[in-house]
Image: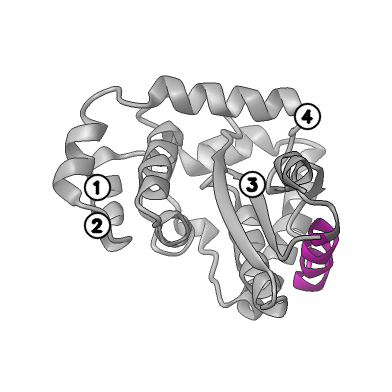
């Protein structure tokens, strides 16, 4: 048995459930202070077909949730807006101008992870998109957000102007899709089991305790 676990959080930065899920995750980790939790953010694009310049948000949502799906979106939105204050977040859906392609945002997340700033970058990106109505597909905006999360803006700006790590992000996303991830957020504990959806903190805390009992394969070999 180990008191250290690793958790992959597969998420997209334009997924409202993922922001709610992040806040619930933060609370869950705080509920189990005796366990050292290593969190690794993994990329997932809910819609990789969107142009790199993005699409008007209202048009995109009308097309995606038209017909019978309209009522489903209304119910989801109502739940999210009701749950948001308890998680300390705010969704301003009506003010979002652009539904961006998130490949560049995931590149920023990858670089932030290399600097130990992935959690800060995720929070900054979620807030920028859902609360502050910023276009997180725009390289200039992403560079500003990266700076707010503690990254070097000159370096990030240069990297975004190139295709650095685009292939790596795609390959990582494909890997998790092949594992069976089809919705986000998905939390993968020690590579052993997964919990899907923006679960309540208590549920995630129980999963952390379970993961302590089920160490990763490498830990088994070391035992």
Instruction: Specify the label residue 143 is tagged with.
Output: 1
The local secondary structure at tag 4 comes to: loop
Name the residue carrying label 4. Answer: 180
CA separation in Å, label 2 and label 4 = 34 Å
Do the residues bearing badges 2 and 1 touch, measured as CB atoms within 8 Å?
yes
Q: From the viewer's perspective, is the residue at label 3 or at label 4 nearer?
A: 3
According to the image, label 3 marks what residue?
8
Q: Residues within 10 Å of mark 2 (few under 14, many from 20)?
A: some
- Tell me residue 29's x, y (percent): 66, 71
Magenta part of the chain: 200-212
Residue under numbered circle 2: 147
**Cα distance between the residues tagged 2 and 1:** 6 Å
Q: How many marks?
A: 4
Asked if 111 appears above or below 3 in the picture, the reply is above
Q: Which percent across, then down, holds residue 67?
A: 77, 36
Residue 70 painted magenta: no
Given residues 118 and 90, the one toward you in this image is 118
Q: Which mark is residue 48?
A: none
Q: Residues at badges 3 and 2 in contact (C-beta under 8 Å)? A: no
- Name the spot of residue 220 as percent of width and height, x first: 79, 44
Q: Secondary structure at mark 3?
A: strand
């Amino acid at each position: 048995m180990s008191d250290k676990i690793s958790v992959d959080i597969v998420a997209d930065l334009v997924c409202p459930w993922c922001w709610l899920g992040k806040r619930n995750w933060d609370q869950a980790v705080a509920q189990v202070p005796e366990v050292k939790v290593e969190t690794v953010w993994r990329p997932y694009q809910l819609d990789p077909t969107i142009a790199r310049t993005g699409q008007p948000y209202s048009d995109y949502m009308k097309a995606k949730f038209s017909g019978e799906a309209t009522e489903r979106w209304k119910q989801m939105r109502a739940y999210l807006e009701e749950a948001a204050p308890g998680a300390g977040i705010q969704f301003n859906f009506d003010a979002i101008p652009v539904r961006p392609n998130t490949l560049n945002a995931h590149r920023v997340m990858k670089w932030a992870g290399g600097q130990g700033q992935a959690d800060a970058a995720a929070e900054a990106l979620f807030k920028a998109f859902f609360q502050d109505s910023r276009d997180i597909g725009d390289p200039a905006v992403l560079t500003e957000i990266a700076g707010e999360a503690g990254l070097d803006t000159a370096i990030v700006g240069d990297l975004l102007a190139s295709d650095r790590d685009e292939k790596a992000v795609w390959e990582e996303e494909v890997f998790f899709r092949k594992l069976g991830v089809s919705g986000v957020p998905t939390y993968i504990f020690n590579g052993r089991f997964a919990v899907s959806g923006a679960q309540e903190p208590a549920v995630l805390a129980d999963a952390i305790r379970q993961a302590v009992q089920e160490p990763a394969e490498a830990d088994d070999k070391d035992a």
